[in-house]
Image: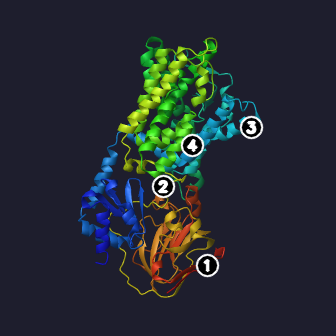
């Protein structure tokens, strides 16, 4: 009954039982799915003496308790009458599965882009400033300074598929570095040289899908396209690659699995992408470009609305490349282009929506993302705005498309045209000046279009954008971190039987559970541990895949994924050993437990074995925090300062 009052306080502060859809727990925290996050008093919970901290991630309201979370969980379930929490949580998962295909696609794209948003913003701003320097005459585009700034700003965009290969493969449950290898093949420089060679055959000659073929694979013709800066091809490739990798991993013998699985996966997926995924994207782009050009010749107003309104959608799917060749051809043959001109207002519509989000939101993380996204979009680089702000929030993206459609319609009706290829964003404005007539009606039509697009997107987003605190929290990861919640355990339904072992704490020497290198707790990339919110301790980077019991005691917790072990020693210390960072995502793969929850162990007993190489190949760190979660029961908790340690050495000293 000692947690009854704490359970009451937690339930009250999350908004009461009526605000709780379900509650589960992991090794350190309660995980609530709330109907309305705004009803929860996060500040009061964080200030509660028995609560370590509060986190919000992946739609969950997480109350960090510590090693005794199973006992608190029991009290919360009893106090709140959550007998049906499992069924409710299952229903919650079913609701997630009811998402439409478009909504699911947006969620996948957004989550894949979240880790790279800071780099997208940084390089986008560099590209924008470089264009500005040239437009103002401060730099020549042939100067060394321009070239260096250009490769800094453009390098990330050029090889964007490699970065997305990592994040997408991780999202789909595959090996992240395998995703990078697939992407590296798609953007290999030699492909450009092959694409310039004389074709040996032409497919679909005389049609809009006419495609020259310069190379074949095992006799199968391959239609080459540029995958640099593309998005959809690598996402589709990694989606299938993750499935293929898992299948091979299930049938390949363990002794050769580490290199045979990626070997076979690469041999299947990369050619499949060149032969099927790439050509489909190419033909789709060409068809859309042909349809838009034809539509513009007959009904400019409708074409302006469609091209302007859907341009950012085409960019997301990567099929806008089918229109770009028409743009360059128009400039070469006619001396001007009215097709891409209709898309010019799109970036201003995006920043209008972003500005409205920045003003309306109370979420500090979203505000920090919005400002650099606005600056980048002002210079014509809208990826940070799309993938970081408007697309994850969904409604603002729709509002920006409406604003862009209005701008495209005005450009089409006023006859605005581009007379040269030039920089992006605001510095592209001079390219609308007629080379003979100067500033004419078309130029002023373009100026009106960007003002209208900005204003329409801003007003619609501000008043109808559905910018709620809950949406913001779920959609955005800030502070430049790869994940908002690095220490993010899988949900556990039901009870983790943490045995009741009341013991008066005594002075004790806690041995190292592993052989390896000492790392200060403050240096690891998990604020729950590095801030000592879970208790004082130290981290070890093990040099062999074994964890041993650091003292005589009872195994109070063995998490289902085998990466987290809680031991209460005979002298009262509560020791948490957490093997690796975010290794819960492996779902127990590469881990083998030699103990069970409730076992008595002696110092030096083998607890868990794990494969360091495979864990690291999967993209996870094996740095292992060892903390005393009942630190507040001691006068002092001291850790050793040596660089290396073995399992026979003392790691932590507790004194009462």
Query: Of marks 2 and 4, which one's residue comes earlier in the chain?
Result: 4
Query: Of marks 3 and 2, which one's residue comes earlier in the chain?
Result: 3
Residues 327 and 556: in front is 327
Look at mark 1 in the image and give the residue it sits on. Answer: 640
Which corner quadrant of the image does residue 520 belong to?
bottom right
Q: CA distance from mark 3 to mark 2?
A: 36 Å
**Disc 3 element:** helix
Which circle marks residue 125 in the picture? none
User: Do labels 2 and 4 touch, CB within 8 Å?
Assistant: no
Question: How would you rate the neighbour count of disc 3 (Cα within 10 Å): few for under 14, some for 14-19, many for 20 or more?
Answer: few
Q: CA distance from mark 2 to mark 1?
A: 31 Å
Q: CA distance from mark 3 to mark 1?
A: 50 Å
**Disc 2 element:** loop
Look at mark 2 in the image and give the residue it sits on. Answer: 484
Which corner quadrant of the image does residue 604 belong to?
bottom right
Look at mark 4 in the image and give the residue it sits on. Answer: 121
User: Do labels 4 and 1 touch, CB within 8 Å?
Assistant: no
User: Do labels 2 and 1 touch, CB within 8 Å?
Assistant: no
Q: Nearer the viewer, mark 4 or mark 1?
A: 4
**Farthest right residue?**
144
Which circle marks residue 145 in the picture? 3
Query: Of marks 4 and 1, which one's residue comes earlier in the chain?
Result: 4
């Amino acid at each position: 009954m000692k947690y009854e009052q704490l359970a009451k306080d937690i339930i009250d502060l999350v908004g009461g039982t009526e605000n709780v859809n379900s509650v589960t727990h992991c090794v350190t925290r309660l995980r609530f799915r709330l109907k309305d996050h705004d009803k929860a008093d996060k500040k009061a919970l964080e200030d509660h003496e028995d609560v370590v901290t509060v986190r919000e991630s992946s739609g969950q309201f997480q109350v960090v308790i510590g090693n005794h979370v199973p006992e608190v969980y029991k009290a919360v379930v009893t106090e709140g009458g959550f007998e049906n929490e499992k069924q409710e949580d299952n229903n919650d998962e079913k609701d997630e599965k009811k998402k439409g295909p478009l909504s699911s696609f947006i969620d996948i794209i957004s989550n894949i882009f979240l880790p790279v948003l800071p780099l997208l913003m940084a390089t986008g701003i560099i590209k924008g400033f470089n264009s500005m320097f040239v437009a103002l005459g401060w730099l020549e585009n042939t100067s060394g300074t321009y070239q260096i700034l250009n490769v800094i700003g453009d390098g990330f965009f050029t090889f964007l598929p490699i970065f997305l290969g990592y994040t997408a493969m991780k999202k789909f449950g595959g090996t992240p570095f395998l995703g990078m290898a697939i992407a590296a093949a798609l953007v290999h420089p030699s492909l450009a040289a092959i694409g310039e060679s004389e074709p040996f055959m032409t497919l679909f000659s005389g049609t809009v899908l006419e495609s020259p073929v310069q190379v074949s694979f095992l006799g199968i013709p391959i239609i080459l396209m540029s995958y640099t800066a593309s998005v959809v091809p690598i996402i589709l490739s990694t989606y299938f690659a993750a499935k293929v990798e898992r299948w091979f991993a299930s049938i390949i013998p363990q002794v050769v699995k580490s290199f045979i699985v990626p070997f076979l996966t690469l041999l299947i997926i990369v050619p499949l992408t060149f032969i099927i995924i790439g050509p489909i994207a190419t033909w789709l782009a060409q068809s859309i470009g042909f349809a838009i050009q034809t539509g513009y010749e007959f009904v400019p107003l409708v074409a302006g609305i469609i091209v302007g309104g859907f341009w950012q959608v085409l960019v997301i799917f990567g099929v806008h490349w089918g229109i770009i060749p028409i743009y360059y051809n128009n400039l070469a043959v006619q001396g001007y282009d009215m097709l891409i001109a209709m898309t010019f207002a799109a970036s201003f519509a995006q920043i209008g929506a972003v500005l409205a989000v920045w003003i309306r939101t109370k979420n500090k993380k979203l505000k920090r993302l919005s400002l650099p996204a606005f600056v980048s979009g002002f210079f014509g680089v809208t990826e940070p705005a799309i993938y970081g702000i408007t697309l994850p929030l969904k409604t603002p993206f729709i509002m920006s498309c409406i604003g862009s459609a209005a701008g495209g319609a005005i450009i089409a009706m006023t006859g605005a045209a581009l007379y040269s290829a030039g920089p992006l964003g605001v510095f592209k404005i001079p390219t609308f000046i007629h080379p003979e007539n100067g500033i004419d009606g078309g130029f002023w039509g373009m100026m009106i279009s960007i003002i209208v697009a900005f204003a329409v997107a801003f007003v619609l987003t501000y008043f109808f954008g559905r910018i709620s605190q809950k949406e913001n929290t779920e959609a955005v990861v800030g502070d430049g971190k790869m994940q908002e919640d690095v220490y993010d355990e899988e949900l556990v339904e039901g009870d983790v039987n943490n045995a009741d072992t009341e013991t008066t704490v005594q002075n004790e020497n806690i041995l190292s559970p592993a052989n390896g290198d000492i790392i200060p707790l403050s240096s690891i990339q998990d604020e729950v541990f590095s801030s000592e919110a879970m208790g004082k301790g130290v981290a070890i980077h093990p040099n062999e895949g074994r964890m041993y019991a650091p003292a005589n005691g009872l195994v109070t917790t063995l998490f289902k994924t085998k990466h987290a072990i809680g031991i209460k020693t005979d002298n009262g210390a509560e020791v948490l050993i957490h093997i690796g960072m975010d290794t819960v995502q492996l779902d127990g793969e590469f881990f083998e437990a030699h103990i069970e929850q409730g076992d008595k162990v002696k110092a030096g007993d083998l607890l868990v074995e794990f494969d360091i190489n495979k864990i690291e190949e999967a993209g996870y760190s094996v740095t292992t925090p060892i903390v005393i979660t009942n630190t507040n029961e001691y006068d002092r908790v001291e850790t050793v300062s040596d660089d290396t340690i073995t399992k026979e050495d003392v790691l932590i000293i507790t004194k009462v």
